[in-house]
Amino acid sequence: MDLGIAGRTAVLLGSSRGLGRACAESLAREGVNLVLNGRNRADLDDAVAHIAANGSVKVVGVVGDSSTQEVHEALMDACPNPDIVLLNGQGPSPARFADLDDSMWFDALRQALIGPLGYLQRVLPGMCERRFGRVVAISSAMVKSPNSAMSLSHGSRLGLTGVLKGLSKDVVKFNVTINQILPERFDTARQEQMARVVMKMKGVTYEEARAEQVASIKAGRLGQATELGDAFAFLCSAQAGYISGQNLQMDGGSYEGVF
Amino acid sequence: MDLGIAGRTAVLLGSSRGLGRACAESLAREGVNLVLNGRNRADLDDAVAHIAANGSVKVVGVVGDSSTQEVHEALMDACPNPDIVLLNGQGPSPARFADLDDSMWFDALRQALIGPLGYLQRVLPGMCERRFGRVVAISSAMVKSPNSAMSLSHGSRLGLTGVLKGLSKDVVKFNVTINQILPERFDTARQEQMARVVMKMKGVTYEEARAEQVASIKAGRLGQATELGDAFAFLCSAQAGYISGQNLQMDGGSYEGVF
Amino acid sequence: MDLGIAGRTAVLLGSSRGLGRACAESLAREGVNLVLNGRNRADLDDAVAHIAANGSVKVVGVVGDSSTQEVHEALMDACPNPDIVLLNGQGPSPARFADLDDSMWFDALRQALIGPLGYLQRVLPGMCERRFGRVVAISSAMVKSPNSAMSLSHGSRLGLTGVLKGLSKDVVKFNVTINQILPERFDTARQEQMARVVMKMKGVTYEEARAEQVASIKAGRLGQATELGDAFAFLCSAQAGYISGQNLQMDGGSYEGVF
Amino acid sequence: MDLGIAGRTAVLLGSSRGLGRACAESLAREGVNLVLNGRNRADLDDAVAHIAANGSVKVVGVVGDSSTQEVHEALMDACPNPDIVLLNGQGPSPARFADLDDSMWFDALRQALIGPLGYLQRVLPGMCERRFGRVVAISSAMVKSPNSAMSLSHGSRLGLTGVLKGLSKDVVKFNVTINQILPERFDTARQEQMARVVMKMKGVTYEEARAEQVASIKAGRLGQATELGDAFAFLCSAQAGYISGQNLQMDGGSYEGVF
């Protein structure tokens, strides 16, 4: 399938590893030039080098925390007019509700809500003027099925979900779409980290913690990052311009609700 | 993007025209062999001929009402082991709630609920055994946003939505996914027919009725059938195996709700 | 709390036992005159006698299957102008998807979709004219969380859910509200029957089957019919006129989804 | 209807005016002792005086911004063991997305998300120990139907919605329920203020702005605060213990979505 976006340019927040990197790789296969971002310079350099080596697209990296104004400015310098934007970032660690405090909230909200929206304020107007834009946020399946141990995560991400939905109504008439992907349990470093949290909390082995993750997914397996990358690329395609304001669950069919 | 389904076989109910035909054309481009279906032999023959002429896939047609057991049997004869199934059919005409009677209900329910499920009973077990299946139903945006003039339509289609969701939970572990697309106002013969209904109901011109359709869509345009065809093809891809039980709205971003 | 409905008249389909009877008892306490209905004459007579004996409201019974036109006519004779209507009826038995056939579908759809709507066609216009109406359907928690063994139930009830939502938009301007209650696992004969089904299916004792029911509810207990009756009465109150098109889950907080 | 809560004690954040005060008045009628709160001392004193004068319950006031730790402490001093809690507060003013900045976000999030949760951290454990608790938040219809001009509001309130849902799953087994009411356009000072905002934005008269509010509601009228107060009281009742994690829309039947 020709996605109709060869030659476009994408800025991908949080794309040096895991799901974000898979999104970058899927876009590179479609001929999209890339600006990658991540906090860890070694990871970022590795992603830039590999993607550049495997394809014919331009790839640059902007290191740093994508929720900060400094990084927003560096991204604007690297790409003043992105056609495609990925909003992605590491989620907070699990925490008991009783243990949450103001500074944990403000950190989580800056990372998952205020930061991404600050970057969108910079790039949405140009997308609307140029009559093309594809914004996709990687959120979490938990926004539809919250669990108190992840309050910081879904508290922030649901806020973003709502704001993006409201914005999507304003900009779709300019061929600018805004969608979210809601992943659950992909086979990335994040799930390895979560397994280690569960080992400690429940006193189980790493293998048991991983088996528990698989058992929680109706598909009987974890998701593969390339699957998410390709779904992301489809949502960024020219022919996805009539799809906006959607929250696509990628959860191995696990969500119980009809909608 | 390589969808990983070249050489697979699909049975598409209600695919001689409009959205169903666009789904067939998108799959043909991916190298999927097709069994098409429609009630009108001339339309069906035209679809078979054109798709066969434009590509290198095998295309056959089974004429008839896809909600009947006779057509289910003919489809099984034509393709005992489909990998991909499209559930699609013409919706009922608008009607005032006060005018509905039992026979209108039974017709609508046979078309949109009982018939499609009868066909699924025949093909789902084989998909599970063979560890690959992609079932997609074309429903309607109204299942999430009902309007009393279309009670026959969403009354039937919501029933199907629920049954498919329940089934999806059982079969996803066999790499069989079941999803729905919820279209709103695509530029097909259906919307031309709806415009003519509105002309009579409101005493407006055809052009006014069409302009009203466009105005009802936040994207400021109707959807194109090829857009839906490609979204369908993506949901049928090998790499969409972690996506199941989803209701993807293709409505130009018009739905008001956050989920 | 004064519900402001003393002296009103209610027709309650399926009210001789269980949840329906509890709804009747709650309305009787508020001074609402009642027309009860059930298929079993002894149960119905018992309900009429007890409610009449305990209060000062008028109570009559109409025996028969509330999905039939004959019973609709008898109900209209008993009460041509109801202010309040309960739509309730026994759900179908569990069945494997593979075992469903057309006649099982038509029976289920007549009971849970076509029958109730036929009765509504008779009474809604009068409610609109008189500028007061409260319609409440007892549906099932499964309409938001379907399970394939209950396809007949949620396939029918979701259809009703959609039609009622569409209708609610038309009539709320006349102070006629339409809402649903979605119960899960109330301590009635229905759950005793479901426990016996589970005993056979899983080879467990009755006590084990009942314990499983309790364990499936986050509240750690089954619901009490009187709780549902009072929630129903509240939705029928004068002061609930701004609440319409709602699906109130009474499930001991068990639903996973945020909406 | 006897709500079974006479003699209980409630703490109501943001209850000196409007919807919050109506909640207080409904509880007072049920014999619940009250701790009221508001930022404006004159309004608060008025509310305390009137409610105390009209009933036989104990009423005290705690003045101040309910999102601050100082006020949380004062509320704990006034009532260490509340049985019932209302989470309510003034929403932010409308603002264009382009104009939002970090400090506007942090203010809104403190008011609508972090502040209320900080208070809940103090009172939930006691409710669980005592095996009774009713927490209700007054949110906004916009959490299900976002509009970009109110991003600060639904961005914050959706976050709260998610966190409360997650928490509700943990505490319902202790007979502690957590629900939200989602109001749209009640006839309070808030809508008068919104009408004045619209006057300026659209250059219309106050009467036109008010008429627009009414026209936006399918019921053809604004809601009355007493209606919301009574719904709140019902959700706080003893017999509402099986209802938790719900988002009850009070919007005159205006929401388009089926769920």
Image: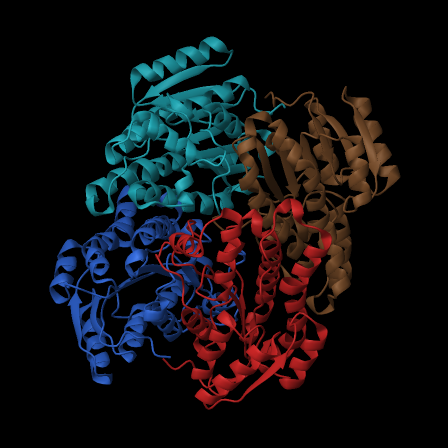
Chain colours: A red, B blue, C cyan, D brown
Residue D108 locus on image (x, y percent): 73, 55
Depicted D183 relative to depicted D103: above or below? above
Total of numbered circles in the picture? 0
The residue most toward the right is D42
Is residue C72 at all visible to an observer of this figure?
A: no
- Furthest-left residue in this view: B77
Residue C34 x, y percent position in the rendering: 45, 20
Percent x, y for residue C139?
Answer: 41, 37
- Spot the residue most to the top: C53
Q: Is residue D227 above or below residue A184?
A: above
Residue A113, picture quadrant: bottom right
Q: At x 42% / y 29%, what residue is drawn?
A: C186
| Depicted A158 relative to depicted D69: above or below | below
Task: Identify the residue at image location x=34%, y=40%.
Answer: C113
Question: Is B19 in front, or is D166?
Answer: D166
Residue A135 shown left or right of residue C151 in the figure: right
Camera-nearest residue between C226 and B61: C226
| Residue A141, horizontal then vertical, whole percent | 49, 57
Query: Left or right: C9 with respect to B11?
Result: right
